[in-house]
Image (cartoon, rainbow, N blue to C red):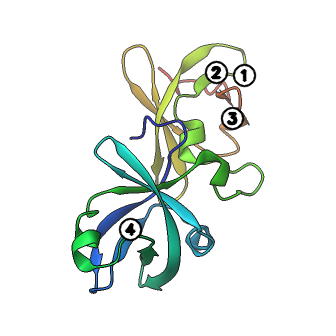
């Protein structure tokens, strides 16, 4: 979804809101405080990324309304519709221990406890009971529950996820 190493997606800009240049953003973060603390955002339109100062943040239902410096009227706000909203890697909101952002997990090698290479995480699916890793193997995609009894260790810096040797999981 994102090939920029210093662009971490936090939302999608939906449309202009009102006539003063506010924009409506659909957040992809579960952490509401992530938006309340914003001072700058990266706006990605096509292949161009612009950094804009956040002048005001407010909430309307499940959407975030942002007032951005330099976006002073409805026309300018409409020009941003469909853009991706992100932050720099250094500005990601800190997570609790043993919790990871999707971008930290996608691309990780999945290895069994016995050391067998199982595949690569290509996506993290949000399910009602727990997240699930979509792992690409040599010939197919396998869904691996992201639970403590299956995932034994995550080494996010090394991009390695160690999973239990559950019989039949990768067969």
Q: Nearer the viewer, residue 23 or 165?
A: 23
Q: Nearer the viewer, mark 3 or mark 2?
A: 3
Structural crowding at the residue carrying mark 2, measured as other residues with C-alpha within 10 Å and reported as few (<14), some (14–19) or many (≥20): many
Q: Nearer the viewer, residue 76 or 88?
A: 76
What percent of the width, then of the height, locates residue 67?
43, 77
Q: Nearer the viewer, mark 3 or mark 4?
A: 4
Which residue in the structure is indicated by mark 3?
156
Mark 3 and mark 4 residues within 8 Å of each other at the beta carbon = no
Disc number for residue 41: none
Residue, x 71% and y 57% (percent of image)? 94
Which residue in the structure is indicated by mark 2?
111
What percent of the width, then of the height, locates residue 167?
59, 24
Residue 124 drawn above or below residue 20: above
Q: Nearer the viewer, mark 2 or mark 1?
A: 2
Residue, x 26% and y 64% (percent of image)? 81
What percent of the width, then of the height, locates residue 41?
50, 60
Which residue in the structure is indicated by mark 4?
26
In the visual, does 117 lie left or right of 2? right
């Amino acid at each position: 979804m994102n090939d920029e190493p210093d662009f971490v997606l936090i939302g999608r800009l939906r449309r202009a809101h009102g006539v003063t240049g506010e924009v409506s953003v659909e957040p992809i973060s579960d952490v509401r405080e992530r938006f309340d603390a914003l001072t700058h955002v990266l706006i990605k339109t096509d292949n161009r990324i612009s950094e804009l100062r956040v002048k005001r943040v407010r909430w309307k239902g499940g959407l975030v309304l942002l007032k951005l410096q330099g976006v002073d009227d409805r026309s300018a706000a409409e020009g941003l519709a469909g853009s991706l909203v992100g932050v720099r890697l250094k500005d990601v909101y800190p997570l609790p221990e043993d919790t990871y952002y999707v971008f930290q997990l996608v691309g990780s090698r999945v290895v069994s406890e016995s050391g067998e290479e199982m595949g690569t995480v290509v996506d993290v699916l949000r399910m009602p009971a727990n997240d699930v890793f979509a792992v690409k193997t040599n010939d197919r995609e396998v869904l691996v529950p992201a639970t403590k009894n299956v995932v034994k260790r995550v080494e996010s810096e090394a991009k390695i996820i160690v999973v239990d040797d559950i019989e039949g999981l990768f067969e």
